[in-house]
Image (cartoon, helix red, strand yellow):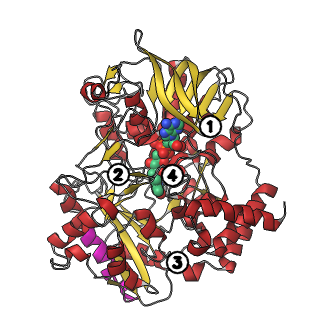
Amino acid sequence: MSMLATIGQVAHFAGSLTGNPLAIIGLVPIFAAGLAFMRYVSIDPEAHPVNVRHVRPEYDFIVVGGGSAGAVVASRLSEIANWTVLLLEAGGDENEISDIPALSGYTQMSQFDWMYQTSPPGDSPYCLAMIGDRCNWPRGKVLGGSSVLNAMIYIRGNRHDYDQWAAMGNTGWSYPEVLPYFLKSEDNRNPYLARTKYHNTGGYLTVQESPWRTPLSIAFLQAGRELGYEVRDLNGEKQTGFMLSQGTIRRGSRCSTSKAFLRPVKSRQNLHIAMYSQVTKVMIDPKTKTAYGVKFTRNNRPQTVRARREVILSAGAIGTPHILMLSGVGEKSHLESFKIPVMSDLKVGYNLQDHIGLGGLTFVIDDPITFTKTRYQTFAVAMEYIVNERGPMTSLGGVEGLAFVNTKYAPKSGSWPDIQFHFAPSSINSDGEQVKKITGLRDSVYNTVYKPLKNAETWTILPLLLRPRSTGWVRLKSKDPNIYPDINPNYFTHKEDILTLTEGIRIALNVSNTQSFQRFNSRPHKIPFPKCRQYDWDSDEYWECSLRHFTFTIYHPTSTAKMGPASDPDAVVDPRLRVYGIKGLRVIDASIMPTIVSGNTNAPTIMIGEKGSDMIKQDWGIRV
Ligand SMILES: Cc1cc2nc3c(=O)[nH]c(=O)nc-3n(C[C@H](O)[C@H](O)[C@H](O)COP(=O)(O)OP(=O)(O)OC[C@H]3O[C@@H](n4cnc5c(N)ncnc54)[C@H](O)[C@@H]3O)c2cc1C
């Protein structure tokens, strides 16, 4: 294939991603993608998984959803040579654009994204700065799932999270019991990390720091020290402190779970992967209450496939409860209102938890050292990515530094921080209007608050609430599987969530006040949101108003099929991830977290995939 043809093909794909790519993302990333494509075709040893043409009538195991967890489960189960495994994925395959770390925002609102939205809020307002008072909730609709859309940040959560799960009655899920599963996946490429007992090499999932960063990342670490925090591996012994971001990247490109877990096993004859296959229902025998297969639609054709041993739902925190409820597993009164026969009366869809913070908390500096589109979308930058797998294009979604800090509301031990910082040497409009587009910011907000920052040197901290008290739900709107469910996160129904975040914002302001940032004359950008003008800047009321406007989720919905012991009335699955009341049906994905972990959710979900796979093997008599 000629170079021009290849570039044309990638540009065409980019068009489908953005609507008008040449206007929005400019030529350079397209060149980058085109050239990267050439390199992959010629030298990449990891050819893509095969989309099987025909699905057999029956398999031993059916895995629904090939995302962060599902790709792991399909890979691990098919290690058993005499088991047949079918992986059904609603989306298609990832590609060269989604591989470029710095362009991670461009896969949102594309064919790779389910494009969910929260329902408009009730009494506790949130997302008010967004069109229709609704926040976008991107979810991966692609092999690799949300690991293809995410910012690639690798964080495992706090050891107390897992000890708390175990203390809730979830035998086997304490920190010492889950750590081996984090290690099992990992191939850490930073020798100084790899040699510690908290990291590993040789696993499928590549983890490393981005090979490139701006000078401000070092200022961020130094600021942490000035504030009394240690710079340390936040995936190591202690979580409190500051560090450079670690990410799931390999040779400078995204390492999705499809790339990590499915490509290496693509030639296994006992693993079939069927893409563009949307599961609409789990078939459950009403007499024996046993799951025996699934219904799915592929190329507009409804089909069924049977499972000899088990059906595993790995469709994510929205998809899994949606499928469960459509299949008659959910709260009795809710299902009956849609005339869905009830197979098991369980609190499916409840307990929805998510991490939120204040979006757009921006600081301005004088020096020309930040990440701006004009500075970094150049031919030289593209070539550095293509030829050397290095440079600004390898930046982990622009997030260069991370920190876990304690507000006065955190446990007194100091070892279970309640706020996480994501540090980025950029702001809402450093990338033209792409961030505006994917967050759904109203014109009035963007034009008033962020447009004046055009050409400014900026940096941002996203203060994130790690353990929200407010929980929400996912409920059916219809029994038609193509109608998205009602997603109501109920943000800020607990005042403590606002109070904790307000303290977190003030610690972020202190970061800017350190000598490390004052060297650059750092100062907060103080233009208020139009509807928060009546409050004094930095008053409690001002921050509450700001939080309720630019409510920023970093897309970590979890816990909608809660794991718990039989004594827990809210539990949907038991500690071996089996759905209560139904034989042959498990859930293995982010939905099972009884409480959201204190940190980004991709690595914990991959761990759940690893551990869940071993549980299945054990339960079928395989030694692991
Ligand atoms: C934009 C974005 C940025 C993020 N950034 C980070 C980050 O930097 N670090 C981090 O740790 N976490 C991040 N996350 C969160 C993290 O990626 C998710 O928590 C994690 O991927 C969830 O894994 P999962 O297996 O539960 O679901 P998913 O990975 O979403 O997988 C579910 C899969 O099931 C498929 N599916 C759903 N319904 C059906 C159906 N009916 N039939 C067939 N298939 C179906 C989907 O298409 C998808 O492939 C981010 C998420 C997003 C969306």
- Nearer the observer: mark 3 or 1; the answer is 1
Q: What element carries label 1?
A: loop
Q: Nearer the viewer, mark 4 or mark 3?
A: 4
Residue at horizontal 69 percent and vertical 38 percent from the top = 51
**Residue segment shown in magenta:** 504-521
Q: Is residue 242 visible?
A: no
Q: How crowded is mark 3: few (under 14 residues within 10 Å), some or many (20 or more)?
A: some
Q: Where is residue 59 in the image (x, y as percent from the top left)?
A: 62, 21
The residues bearing labels 1 and 2 have C-alpha atoms spaced at a distance of 40 Å
Q: Is residue 597 magenta?
A: no
Q: Find numbered disc 4 in the image and state the secondary structure of the residue it sits on.
A: loop
Label 3 SS: loop
Q: Which mark is residue 214?
A: 3
Q: Which of marks 4 and 3 is nearer the N terminus?
A: 4
The kind of residue tagged 1 is: Asn
Q: Quick one: label 4, few (<14), some, or many (20+) residues within 10 Å? A: many
Q: Say which amino acid is labelled 3.
A: Thr
Asked if labels 3 and 2 touch by Cβ distance under 8 angstroms, the answer is no
Residue type, label 2: Ser
Q: Residue 598 carries which label?
A: 2
> On screen, 243 above or below 213?
above
Identify the mark nearer the N-term, 2 or 3.
3
